[in-house]
Image: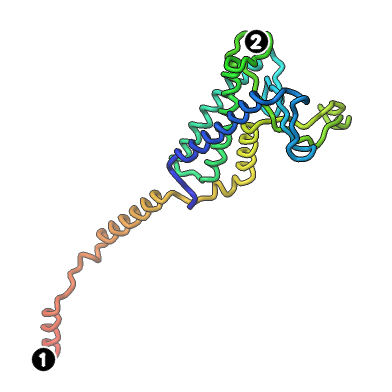
Amino acid sequence: MNQSRNPAPYLLFSVLLIGIDQASKLLVHQYMQPGFSGQIALIGDWLKLHYVLNPGMAFGMQLGHEYGKLFLTLFRLVAMVAIGGYMIHLARAGASKGLLWALAMILAGAVGNVIDSTFYGVLLGNAPYGSPTPWFHGQVIDMIFVDFWEGFIPDWVPVWGGQYYSTPIFNIADSCIFLGVCSILIFQGSFHSHGPEPEEEEKEEREEGEKEEGASEADPRNDIPTPTSTEEEDENKKESI
């Protein structure tokens, strides 16, 4: 049975991923130039480090509303608390380890981008021009560029037809969220296939045993006295006479 009631390993895993995410962002901020001028090729022409600032959502998407960034940051804060609380609850309830590891990745991604949105406007001074306050308006640092396609989307595609598209640039926090969500979607059957808790099984066995004992005590046939060996000998003598 693939279960654990201790949330500490999953929280520590989230902290480790958050540390890796933040370290990568600060290194990129410190040592790379934004845009194509500072781009670094890692594997051929399709995997690159490309420093960009993302004022909006994951994978380079943005919210265009004046208060979109504030709404997004507040939403991330609420989601972060909800995911963390839910993961701890599931761990204490004995949920599948696979599900808990996936939630730990999602939690790490949410926290990683919340740190950017909440503090980077102040610590790194990267809040967009015209922001009412640098707090909660920091821009997320993205740097992973998988450049496998760019061009115009065919006109027959609904909504996005005719628009120019290039592969989104993302960060480690985005990757954690993506991998965690995909793991839950792909393996949800195995995550929820575990049987009842050991304590519940023991409780059911005890209840069944108590029911059997109660039924045995209530059986009127149990009140009929069993003849002793002496009584049986006397009866045998009478029959022989």
Q: Tell which circle, 2 or 1, labels the residue nearer the N-terminal end.
A: 2
Taking the view exactly as shown, the residue that stands out farthest to the bottom is 241
What SS does tag 2 mark?
loop
Q: Nearer the viewer, residue 63 or 216?
A: 63
Give residue 230's position: percent from left, percent from top: 11, 80
Which amino acid type is shown beneath numbered disc 2?
Answer: Ser
Q: Amino acid at mark 1?
A: Ile
Q: Position of residue 53 (x, y in %)?
A: 69, 22
Residue drawn at the location 58% of the way across and 28% of the way down: 22
Mark 2 and mark 1: Cα distance apart in space: 118 Å
Q: Residue at x 78, y 26 (%)?
A: 36
Left or right of 43 on screen, residue 90? left
In depth, the one of 180 and 113 nearer the eye is 113
Q: Quarter of the image containing the C terminus?
A: bottom left
Location of residue 34 with respect to 177 vertically, above or below? above
Q: In the rendered image, which quarter is residue 164 located in?
A: top right
x then y, percent, for residue 38: 74, 26
Look at 57% across and 18% down and name the residue there.
Answer: 119
Position of residue 139 relative to residue 16, above or below, is above
Q: Given this view, does label 2 or label 1 mark the residue nearer the observer?
A: 2
Which residue is denoted by mark 1 in the rendering? 241
Residue count near mark 1 (Cα–Cα under 10 Å), binned few <14, some 14–19, many ≥20: few
Residue nearest the viewer, comparing 232 with 71: 71
Image: 108 above or below 53:
below
Residue 131: mark? 2
